[in-house]
Amino acid sequence: MMVKVIFVDHTGLRRETEGAEGSNVMRVAVDNNVPGIDGDCGGMCACATCHITVDAAWADKTGERSELEESMLTFLPDVSPAARLGCQIKLTPELDGLTVHLPIEQF
């Protein structure tokens, strides 16, 4: 099954993409050339170049941050409670239509 993920950049531009169930938000962004998501570590939760903010309407459905994810996010300035690493959000049918917001720049 394909799962729709909507990326919204800092100007409000929306990009609708799709990724395979079981993939993750970072992989969908990289595969669809979404600007602002680098995924330098390849999804190993070893950098923060796939930093996103989960739209409030989806926060409960994406789960909690892991301890490792939390530690990676501490390297970013002004991390919001809804900040996540895209590599750590696995796509499921329940996330079809997931909306995430991109930062102005990755660090």
Image: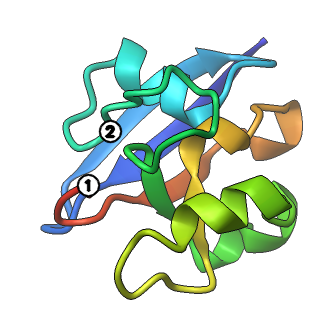
x and y percentages locating residue 90 in the rendered image: 77, 34
C-alpha distance separating marks 1 and 2 = 7 Å
Check disc 2 and give the amino acid type: Ile
Q: Which mark is residue 16?
A: none
Depth check, front residue: 81 or 56? 81
Judging by the rendered image, the residue that carries numbered circle 2 is: 37
Quadrant including the C terminus: bottom left
Q: Reply above or below: 83 against 86.
A: below
Where is residue 82 shown, x and y percent of the image?
A: 61, 77
Would you say 68 lies left or right of 10 here? right
- Identify which residue, 28 or 78, lies in the foreground: 78
Label 1 sits on what residue type? Gln
Q: Earlier in the sequence, mark 1 or mark 2?
A: 2
Element at label 2: loop
Q: What residue is disc 1 on? A: 106
Q: Residue at x 63, y 28 (%)?
A: 44
Given contact means CB atoms under 8 Å apart, are the residues at marks 1 and 2 in contact? yes
Question: Can you say whether 49 is above or below 83 in the image?
Answer: above
Q: Residue at x 18, y 59 (%)?
A: 105
Q: Residue at x 86, y 43 (%)?
A: 94
